Amino acid sequence: MEVIKAFSISVETPKDLVEEYFKLRKVVLDEIFRCIKYSKSGKAHLKFNKAKRKELRDELIKNWRFAKHYVDSAINSVIGLIKGWISLYNQGKAKSKPEITKKSIYVKTTLFKVTNGKIKITIEPNKRGAVKINTSNNYRLP
């Protein structure tokens, strides 16, 4: 059995989703970066608990028109980015604060559906405008 951990495909996605997700990740980075605390020895630690996470999620969802899982995805990806930065910082290898530079969207495997060689990704909740990708003809899985 072959396991695929990541899959990248260029598709025609709604440009406003890509732009809004990019902006969202920058906002999340700023908010979570404020939760970094420094010990007396100069080590960085992330103090971002479930309550703060829920508060941030609830605030971001208020004006978010796309599916909520993109907000969750942005929070998760930024937490991973910051944890990696903290590790480098504590080793003395981080030169500057982390930045969001790539316009990409991460979709968890539980948030898309594969049927008959087609991947369906929801863009807006309760709408028919999902992105459908035919993997059988145009793309070869690694």
Image (tube, grey):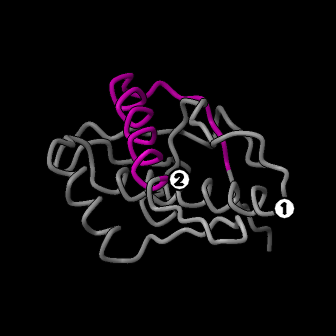
Q: Secondary structure at mark 1?
A: loop
| Residue at image coords 41%, 76% | 49
Taking depth in this image into account, of 138 and 96 the one nearest to the observer is 96
| Residue at image coords 64%, 35% | 137
Residue 57, placed above or below residue 139: below
Residue 40, placed above or below residue 9: below
Taking depth in this image into account, of 51 and 133 the one nearest to the observer is 51
Amino acid type, mark 2: Val
Q: Secondary structure at mark 2?
A: helix
- Residue neighbourhood size for the residue with mark 2, other residues' Cα within 10 Å, grouped as few (<14), some (14–19), many (≥20): many
Amino acid type, mark 1: Gln
Taking depth in this image into account, of 73 and 100 the one nearest to the observer is 100
Q: Position of residue 16 (x, y in %)?
A: 33, 24
Q: Is residue 28 left or right of residue 36?
A: left
Residue 32, placed above or below residue 24: below
The residue identified by callout 1 is 91
Mark 2 or mark 1: which is in front? 1
- Does residue 31 show up magenta in the picture? yes
- Residue neighbourhood size for the residue with mark 1, other residues' Cα within 10 Å, grouped as few (<14), some (14–19), many (≥20): few
Quarter where residue 84 is shown: bottom right
Q: Which residues lie in the magenta part? A: 7-33
Q: Are marks 2 and 1 in contact (CB under 8 Å)?
A: no
The residue identified by callout 2 is 78
| Residue at image coords 19%, 40% | 65
